[in-house]
């Protein structure tokens, strides 16, 4: 019997027992599907986090003002004025390898209005350098300029969601919008960012780029036009851009020592190094991949045991058939090849259906929860290869057992 004939016979036997074959494949389907879905969700989360960290600027250092309870803040202000322009000047002039330092003031939350339309937005006061310090591309118009800072200009740059909510399909450049009682003229619109990857915020994972629900205006205008708690830190954040040859890890130590002196030893600030966040994120992802690999191995092992169990039962069920085939000239390797093909087909097709199942789950998660998912080619290749290998391994013992059957004894079997 040729390999093609043996393969055809094996597939025909599986087709005869459709329900049994389908139930046998369920272990592989759910195992591979779960692995594909988890890897897709994990890869999507990694991509989102890496893009967020990269938008912070891998060659930057972020100096953020810490938040405290009012009673704690009163005591802290007796020793330290908080993050201020003095810190900005000191870092720019006293830390080697610093090319620029940009301030950032957080004014949130605020209701932004234009005509009869209103929406919620996060408002930031920044310098003209901000767009070059972080990845903040402008899609329409321009970003803020130094002239805007010096003249306390009432202008702003808005995110794409603000444009959509307030202006619809109308061009927003030159239009007016209102933040509380302050009127501002729109001079630019930011380019869209990855959905769900808002990078505003004050935690260590927050970034200094932009999101679609943000408004940027000159920080001098923000300081003059908007009311602020006098105990609050004058600046919310400083973005310190380093020269390419400067190590962020070394520079952050210098910045920390300098600010400790300026703030009287009061640790009312925190330092964030995007490069370190990126390294930590990749390390975490590697551990996650190892865990997922172990889970995948267990799932596929269970599926392989199920296939081996069914194939052993099939050998027992078809003992007389094996005896007849051996009696009319079939060789042991023909019998062995047929059973291996059956086990391989169960595992392989189960793996393919599992990939479709897992991709479907990932798609449902992405559409319903708004969580990005990424089905990578390597995860598909590994799942397909491993499922096929499990089939070969799981089918080897039943195939060998079938091939070793004595033809005479097999013919006598009832």
Image (tube, helix red, strand yellow):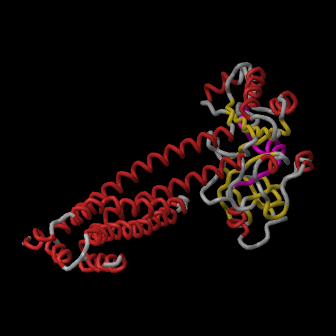
- Residue at the front extreme, as displayed: 329
Give the side of residue 295 with respect to residue 108, left or right: left
Q: Is residue 224 magenta?
A: yes
Q: Which residues are magenta?
A: 214-230
Q: Can you give x and y, in whole percent of width and height, for residue 346 in the image?
A: 33, 69
Give the side of residue 87 with respect to residue 24, left or right: right
Give the side of residue 169 with respect to residue 380, left or right: right
Say if 252 sits above or below 357 in the image. above
Give the side of residue 79 with respect to residue 306, left or right: right
Picture quarter with the C terminus: bottom left
Question: Can residue 221 be spotted in the picture?
Answer: no
Say if 339 sits above or below 69 in the image. below
Relative depth, front residue between 75 and 202: 202
Question: Can residue 151 be spotted in the picture?
Answer: yes
How many numbered circles does the render carry?
0
Relative depth, front residue between 179 and 56: 56
Say if 35 sits above or below 406 in the image. above
Relative depth, front residue between 351 and 228: 351
Q: Can you give x and y, in whole percent of width and height, for residue 358 in the image?
A: 43, 64
Q: Is residue 34 magenta?
A: no
Give the residue drawn at x 49%, y 56%: 39
Give the residue drawn at x 40%, y 64%: 388
Relative depth, front residue between 406 and 192: 406
Picture quarter with the N terminus: bottom left
Residue 331 sits in quarter = bottom left
Residue 170 sits in quarter = bottom right
Give the residue drawn at x 89%, y 51%: 145
Q: Can you give x and y, in whole percent of width and height, for residue 297 in the image?
A: 38, 52
Q: Can you give x and y, in whole percent of width and height, for residue 277 in the image?
A: 63, 40
């Amino acid at each position: 019997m040729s390999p093609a004939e043996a393969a055809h016979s094996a597939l025909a036997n599986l087709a005869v027992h459709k329900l049994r074959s389908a139930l046998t494949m369920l272990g592989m389907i759910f195992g591979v599907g779960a692995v594909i879905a988890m890897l897709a969700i994990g890869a999507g989360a990694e991509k989102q986090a890496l893009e967020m960290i990269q938008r912070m600027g891998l060659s930057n250092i972020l100096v953020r003002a810490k938040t405290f309870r009012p009673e704690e803040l009163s005591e802290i202000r007796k020793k330290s004025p908080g993050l201020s322009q003095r810190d900005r000047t000191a870092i720019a002039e006293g830390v080697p390898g610093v090319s620029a330092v940009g301030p950032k003031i957080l004014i949130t939350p605020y209701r932004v209005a234009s005509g009869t339309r209103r929406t919620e937005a996060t408002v930031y006061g920044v310098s003209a350098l901000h767009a070059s310090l972080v990845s903040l591309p402008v899609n329409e118009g321009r970003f803020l300029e130094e002239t805007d800072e010096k003249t306390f200009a009432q202008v702003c740059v808005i995110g794409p969601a603000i444009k959509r909510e307030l202006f619809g399909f109308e061009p927003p450049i030159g239009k007016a919008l209102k933040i509380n009682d302050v009127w501002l003229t729109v001079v630019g619109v930011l380019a869209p960012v990855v959905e769900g990857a808002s990078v505003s915020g004050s935690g260590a994972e927050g970034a200094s780029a932009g999101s679609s629900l943000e408004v940027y205006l000159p920080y001098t205008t923000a300081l003059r036009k908007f009311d602020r708690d006098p105990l609050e830190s004058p600046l919310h954040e400083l973005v310190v851009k380093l020269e390419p040859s400067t190590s962020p890890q070394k520079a952050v130590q210098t910045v920390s020592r300098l600010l400790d002196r300026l703030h009287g030893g009061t640790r009312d600030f925190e330092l964030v190094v995007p490069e370190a966040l990126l390294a930590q994120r990749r390390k975490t992802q590697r551990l996650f991949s190892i865990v997922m690999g172990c889970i995948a191995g267990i799932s596929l092992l269970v599926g392989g045991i199920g296939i081996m169990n069914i194939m052993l039962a099939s050998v027992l069920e078809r003992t007389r058939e094996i005896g007849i085939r051996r009696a009319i000239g079939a060789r042991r390797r023909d019998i062995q090849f047929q059973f291996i093909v059956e086990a391989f087909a169960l595992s392989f097709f189960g793996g393919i259906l599992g990939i479709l199942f897992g991709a479907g789950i990932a798609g449902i998660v992405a559409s319903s929860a708004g969580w990005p998912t990424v089905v990578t080619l390597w995860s598909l290749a590994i799942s397909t290869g491993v499922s096929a290998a499990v089939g070969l391994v799981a089918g080897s013992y039943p195939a060998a057992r079938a091939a070793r059957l004595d033809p005479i004894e097999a013919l006598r079997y009832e």
